[in-house]
Image: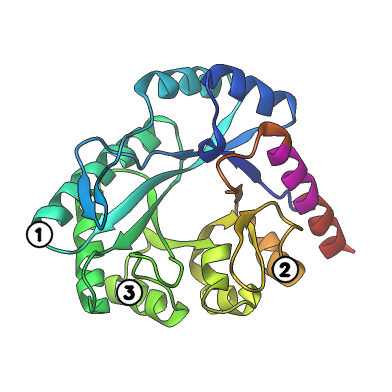
Amino acid sequence: MVKTIIAASTHNAKSPFNSWLKDIYNLGFRYLDVEFFRIIDESYCFKDGVVKIGRLKTDYLKELKQWVDKGLMQVVSFEAGSLYVDDEERLKKSITRVRKVVAEAESFKCPIVSVTPASFKKGISMDTVACCCKKLIDECSCYDVKLALENGEVGSIKILRKPEDIDYVLHKVGSPRLGFCLDVAAAATVDFDVSSYASKLLDYILVIHMNDITKDLRFKNLIIGLGDLEFKPLLAMVKPRRIPLVIEIYSGYSPIDLYLCRRQIEKLVKQVDC
């Protein structure tokens, strides 16, 4: 029987970090996704002023590395955040940051880094996105880590939304080191039948961010089962491929909520096996 990898995410980490790690470990988690996208040197102006973006603390990574080195936890993916394609300056900064995350991922023996093409400008072409992704791949070619482009929800600054656009960029870049990170709730804002959405990119999916969303799209990043998505067709497709499932739910959720979400996913996986 194929084992399904279900990972917690540092998206839900609480302080003190080591206590949070102990909690999720005691609740049965052995796999982790590391959200590493908050970077100090990037700030952008929104309507109400400037939003400054921080980063995961270095001491947290040191603590996590000890867990990994002891064989207590395995990191299945790092999240490097946005690849800004607005202009050459922002692209260059983004690539520099992503490369640092890729280097960190390799030190953890983590095989996947997800990245989200984004822009504050409208009308960015898919050819431009592909060109920027090609530059990123070239910059990270010395690392044994695959990059996964994450889809975004409708109305966000994240560019890749429709499966056709993602497929176009992946084919245009044409690298075996570039794949797809499926964010389920974001996909639902394009096509609520997420299994149909995923089927168009199935051969490229490297990792899946699992969460639920209501049919009216008002409430997202919910524990599986609290929204309206139908997960069994999706799990039936991806389970034989042993694609890691990362629980990416609202950041206010506790370790117990992560555990409950994992149990819901495990129940659905068992139903798929029947």
Instruction: Name the residue at 29% across, 76% down.
Output: 172
User: Do the residues under discs 2 and 1 have CB atoms within 8 angstroms?
Assistant: no
Task: Please say if 149 is above or below 12.
Answer: below
Q: CA distance from mark 1 to mark 3?
A: 19 Å
Task: Name the amino acid type tagged 1.
Answer: Glu
- Indicate which disc residue 228 carries: 2
Residue 134: give x, y in percent of width and height: 23, 64
Task: Name the amino acid type tagged 2.
Answer: Asp
Q: Specify whether 8 is left or right of 95.
A: right
Q: CA distance from mark 2 to mark 3?
A: 30 Å
Residue 58: give x, y in percent of width and height: 35, 22
- Indicate which disc residue 141 carries: none
- Indicate which disc residue 88 carries: 1
Secondary element under disc 1, as helix, strand or loop, is helix
Circle nearer the N terminus (2, 1)? 1
Residue 183: give x, y in percent of width and height: 52, 61
Task: Please say if 248 is above or below 84.
Answer: above
Q: CA distance from mark 2 to mark 1?
A: 41 Å
Find the residue positioned furthest to the right. Answer: 274
Q: Residues within 10 Å of mark 1 (few under 14, many from 20)?
A: few
Give the magenta-colored segment's residue range.
257-265
Q: Residues within 10 Å of mark 3 (few under 14, many from 20)?
A: many
Residue 197 seen in the current view: yes
- Indicate which disc residue 169 carries: 3
The main secondary structure of the magenta stretch is helix
Looking at the rendering, in which quadrant would you find the C terminus?
bottom right
Front tag of 2 and 1 = 2
Q: Specify whether 193 is left or right of 230.
A: left
